[in-house]
Image: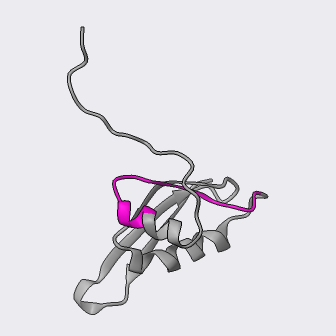
Amino acid sequence: MRVIVTRETDDPKGAGPVGLAVFDPSFPGVFPFRCESPAHLGPLVKCLAQLYSGESPYLQFVVEDAPSIADALASAGAARIHDIVHMRGELPR
């Protein structure tokens, strides 16, 4: 089972989704994971932790192209395990 969780802002000036997470509540991985800013991160992560039903004592997030989100998670105690590098260019023949 996959669950899609969105976090919406309460600010009437910027109403709409500010975060998205797709995950299986029995598996400790979240991908894709997007959050507009570190200010919106806490409630989204807390919601996922409450919905998680697996046995691992942690959740893993795949954070792409969002260094401020990765830094905020690290500041809150998360450990960076892997870095994914997106590379572009023509492959040599």
Q: Residue at x 37, y 89 (%)?
A: 10
Q: Quadrant of residue 34?
A: bottom left
Compared with residue 17, is residue 81 higher up or lower down, i.e. above or below? above
Residue 75, position as x, y percentages in the image: 51, 71
Closest to the observer, 92 or 43: 92
Q: Residue at x 66, y 74 (%)?
A: 50
Question: Viewer-proximal residue, 43 or 24?
Answer: 43
Residue 26, horizontal then vertical, whole percent: 70, 56
39 in magenta: no
Give the camera-side residue of 48 and 2: 48
Residue visible at 79% across and 58% down in the picture: 55
Q: Count the labels in the image.
A: 0
| 15 to 21, vertically: above or below | below
Q: Residue at x 44, y 65 (%)?
A: 71
Colouring mode (rainbow / by chain / secondary structure / one colour): one colour
- Residue 59's x, y, as percent? 63, 60
Viewer-proximal residue among 17 and 58? 58
Give the quadrant of residue 8.
bottom left
Q: In this view, which residue lies farthest toward the right?
A: 55
- Magenta residues span 56-70
Q: Is residue 58 magenta?
A: yes
Q: Residue furthest top?
A: 93
Image quadrant in which the C terminus is located: top left
Q: Please state if 7 lies on the left or on the right of 81 as rendered.
A: left
Q: Position of residue 92 (x, y in %)?
A: 24, 13
Left/right of residue 72 with respect to residue 25 in the rendered view: left
